[in-house]
Image (cartoon, coloured by chain):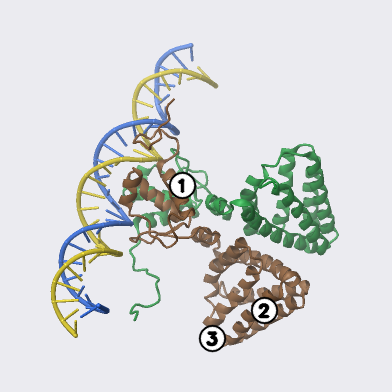
Chain colours: A green, B brown, C yellow, D blue
Amino acid sequence: MAKDQISDTKQSDRERAADRLFLTLMEMIEQGQLKEGDALPPEREIVATYGVSRTVAREAVQALANRGLVDARPRFRPVVKRPSYENALETVGDVIARLLQGESGVRNLFEARMLVEGALVRKAASRATPAEVSKLARALHANKSAVNDSPQFYHTDQAFHRILYEITQNPVLLATHKAFVDWLSPHWVQMPPATERNQANYEAHAAIFDAIQDGDADRAEDTLNAHLEEAWDQVRGTFNKL
Amino acid sequence: MAKDQISDTKQSDRERAADRLFLTLMEMIEQGQLKEGDALPPEREIVATYGVSRTVAREAVQALANRGLVDARPRFRPVVKRPSYENALETVGDVIARLLQGESGVRNLFEARMLVEGALVRKAASRATPAEVSKLARALHANKSAVNDSPQFYHTDQAFHRILYEITQNPVLLATHKAFVDWLSPHWVQMPPATERNQANYEAHAAIFDAIQDGDADRAEDTLNAHLEEAWDQVRGTFNKL
DNA sequence: ACTCTGTTTTGGTATGACCAAATAAGAGGC
DNA sequence: GCCTCTTATTTGGTCATACCAAAACAGAGT
């Protein structure tokens, strides 16, 4: 017979001093008292200001770092970062990277990307404004110009795809794009440069663009899927080459 | 030049001892030496085992907690959690919650959800197996049965939507669903219960299901969008009631 | 203005200690 | 034996102090 209530929200637990300090500092960052790029006060100053031990001060700072609110390199003063979905997601990147081990893990993430991006091109095809289309056109042009310059091509490739996310003007989706790039790119950069591949990818981008410009959502999605599936095949070889 | 193999007291290494210990513990969790549900060894035991100070041991444990690898309630022994996208995303939840402040922030996340879920129903309509369809049918039935029980309806509502993600058998998308629910629900639960609303939502679910069963991707997406947009209007009132 | 150098500051780590809450162990009652 | 209450022990949270090496700073010299 359980006597205690189910509600396990134990607010009765006295909060830890480190957590309190963490909240205080986080609010200072949010409210701009600590601006982006600023260095955090020295630990000993935090100790004096808030009347806590260095242990607590350090734990609070570490908590800030782990949430992407400050950038803390060893032996350097932590620097305030702007709170954003991107920075928050970045902090879990190393764990995500572990979860992505092996081909199937990467494939899962890549499929998620295909799903999202497929929806984005559909949306673009049906609702993109002329201004947005021309923005995409510029990105496509830049991509074409870089066919013979693999590093630059890689860059313009990502930029092209990013436009698809930017069109939504949705910071959550923007962050999603960054997450895809950050977590997928380690596997992509292993591919040896190849101009022919660049050319093929550019043509795929062009086909996607055409479909969007024509307002053909189905074709846009299909060409995008074909493009990404092909890209996957290219990367796949960097795993087990059997 | 001699490279010391044993961790000696001198820290001439550039990397921090806490980071090293963190990695060590993380690998132990990954490799199952520390199983899910297990409690971490007492801090003083970690100190003895790895020859580090308690400061370092505590920082490492905190790092584990901040990445969702252990569940560390104040004053309790940290409990090992299974590494997963869900647990990783959970740790940034509090920062995300801040970013979501105001109607527009929530709207952004909700739009991302609409985009993803729209793609999911399309996929379901065109590729769902009979087994998956019947799974969805069961969820729909459970949802119908709960129309008069708002808490239960809320639960079956989420379950219905989750099936859409489960069909992909993609852990990344599963985690995405959990993130949407976790981050959006705080705003949803503010709505007063209303049987009529439940009924309307159930009917929307049924319409979506029909479209999927018919293999009509366009209709599935349209009905889903209508459903979510309606849900948004319901929630919207909980913000500023201009 | 720039590089080199000595001094001060600051982050990383180690110790040791204390408290209060959690847990384990023991005692007593049914 | 099983359950509850009490006591002893363990353990997490916090503080204070100290030392080292790297970083930031301040001058001196070119």
Q: Is residue A220 left or right of residue A93?
A: right
Q: Amino acid at mark 2?
A: Ser
Q: Mark 3 or 1, which is nearer the eye? A: 1
How many angstroms separate mark 3 from mark 1 (CA)? 47 Å
To which residue does mark 3 refer? Answer: B149
**The numbered mark 3 sits on a residue in which chain?**
B
SS label for mark 2: helix
Seen in the picture, residue C13 relative to B144 is either above or below; the reply is above
To which residue does mark 1 refer? Answer: B23
Q: Mark 1 or 2, which is nearer the eye? A: 2
| Quarter of the figure that contains the N terminus of chain A | bottom left
Q: Mark 2 or 3, which is nearer the eye? A: 2
To which residue does mark 2 refer? Answer: B134
**The numbered mark 1 sits on a residue in which chain?**
B
**The numbered mark 2 sits on a residue in which chain?**
B
Q: Residue at x 40, y 71 (%)?
A: A9
Q: Amino acid at mark 1?
A: Leu
